[in-house]
Amino acid sequence: MPSTPDADVTAASETAPTDLTGNPFAEPSTLPYGLPDFAAIRPEHFLPALRAGIAEQKALIAQVAADVEPPTFDSVIRPLEDGSPLLQRTLPVLFHLLGADGTEELQAIEAEIMPELTALEDSVWLDGRIFARVEDLERDADALDLSPEERHVLERTRLRFELRGAQLDPAQKARLGEVNQELSSLQTRFTQQTKADLHDAAVLVTDEAELAGLDDSQKEAARLAAEDAGKDGWLLTLILPTMQPLLASLTDRTVRERLYTASIERGTETWDLAKKIARLRAEKAHLLGFADFAELAVADRTAKTPSAVEEFLAQIAGPAVRNADREAERLAARAARDGIEELAPWDWSFYSELIRAEEFAVDQAELQPYFVLDRVLEDGVFRAAHDVYGLSFARREDLTPPHPLARIWEVTREDGSAVGLFIGDYFTRPTKRGGAWMNTLVDQSRHDGTLPIVMNTMNVSRPGEGRPAFVSLDEVGTMFHEFGHALHALLSDVENSFVAGTAVARDVVEFPSQVNEMWALREGIVEHYARHVETGEVVPAELLAKVRAAEQWNAGFRTLEHVAAVTLDWRWHRLSEDTHIGDPHAFEAAQLEDAGLAHPLIAPRYRTGYFQHTFSGGYASGYYSYLWAEAYDADAVAWYEEQLAEGISPREAGRRFASGILSIGGSRDLPEAYRAFRGRDRDARFLLERHGLV
């Protein structure tokens, strides 16, 4: 048995200090906004800084545990939540680089340090002495005249101690520590193996004729990918979700089948890793007094109970299947005209786009020249942020970004006052994990006097030398979405960094980002960025009208693939600890069948073997959050439309939304804050209408 967390805390104070001479993490950065000195940071700097930070954090914990003075917010909560300044400087950089430029060297560092970080967390949350201090502080809160934000943080901290095992007996704590260590190791392996599987599954094409349907920029991206991989020909790289964008364009059905099959059959080791992770999470939940991990996970989210999630999903699943079946009939009829007797999953995207072009007169190839990445970003995403929230963006070429392909902008308000830094890293590369995400390197805090440094990362195909990078219509939406997360962090205005920006309950973290998507094709925004790459002409109004008219086409597919993935995440985490799972593939199939979601043409957005969100990405029992948050998003967009219809300017509406929602971060309960903002609870009918489910 490992030593108890209390013993770990005591031992930490005896650890000899680490020599960090010359280490760029040793002292706070002197660069603007505290930007990490990426020009100086090297892989060899991480382990010494992290281990010194762990020792520093343990010393802080020991102080809190041994303190005999009456507890205060500053003496108990702040050391727990802020933690070691050295770790605060080092960890965000490591975690960002692992996702955006995860070299083998960095992955080795991750594998080595994660067990130590897990042990550090346990040394806090399993320490009964510290939990007692928190309970004493909560009992004395009225006398201490805590602010509403401090009261909310205190309540959340006490709940976290309870949900992480502070009330367990010593034997239970010891076992929970072992489970957490095993989970840390397995989740790290799942992340690293998923990325390796993604790159290994890329499809090599050696005959250019097989690329029929791809435009010149797509072919060039495939050629460059092959060149980077040391191969001759064209390499069709994959993104993390099941459906691959190129399936919509490739006219060669055999190549479509190869690409789809490569995507859906990814992973071998990861399936068993997922099974082990789910089993350990079930044991963890049982140790903590919960029936299953899903019940544990939602206890500190806005959903609160598994039944609330399941009732919500029940409103969506049945109508989504019916919509998808209707779409499948139309697709099959169109494919039959080309001599295809039986529609296959790899045909769906191709014929969906044909119908979009023929029936709605929307041709993605026709749209492509109007969506140049830089213009979408600067004249679209940034323009919307300026028009709605009064923000301005100026390139800072004097600052070194985390990667040579990334860029940095300084963000200011209309009066010239500083807001923070925004870093965009948009191009795919072999060391970058799939998908798109937002993260912060520094969080806003009035107490610390810090302003945010926010990053958006995507996987857009890199163009050839001297050529512009294009983004698809879906990627335009993703750029606005991820920047919605960035706005949540940039417009944060809280006292404490640990409740800044996106530090909200997991099942509402997507809410502000989804709201920001409303501006992507909005009149007054779109004409500024959707300009032809060669002529500069604005995208024709009639083409945009067709795009808007076609928005609900394929909604059945999109909703069903998402709900199927939600169901997989949920069912894996409703297992009891004594449930035996043999073949994880069979388990997946059985759960989809049982839920009525086993569609012959539509696979889950993520299958178990590459479901990084749930098995290593922080969304365990939480993938429902996208739809749950979208119910708030759809209601908030309806509010915006009401405001604009009444003659309220976008800037004034944005000011109200920023003040009521974005600025508060996690300093208040979101449903309560939304009720105060909207004057009522969210109304889910707007979500159902958006997806064509009513």
Image (cartoon, rainbow, N blue to C red):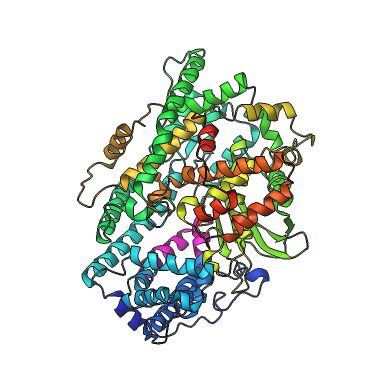
Residue at 64% x, 36% y is 217
- Vertical position of residue 545 compared to residue 429: above or below: above
Q: In this orientation, which residue lies closer to the viewer: 481 or 583? A: 481
Residue at 44% x, 60% y is 107
Q: Is residue 466 left or right of residue 148?
A: right
Residue at 42% x, 28% y is 321
Instruction: Examine the residues drawn in magenta and state their main secondary structure.
Output: helix
Residue 395, percent from left and from top:
73, 58
Residue 606, percent from left and from top:
42, 41
Residue 14, percent from left and from top:
37, 86
Q: Is residue 406 visible?
A: no
State yes or no: residue 547 in magenta.
no
Q: Is residue 666 visible?
A: yes
- Vertical position of residue 54 compared to residue 405: above or below: below
Residue 468, percent from left and from top:
70, 42
Magenta residues span: 94-116
Residue at 61% x, 61% y is 492
- Vertical position of residue 286 compared to residue 234: above or below: below
Q: In this orientation, which residue lies closer to the viewer: 149 or 464? A: 149
In the rendered view of the protein, which quadrant contains the N terminus? bottom left
- Vertical position of residue 22 compared to residue 270: above or below: below
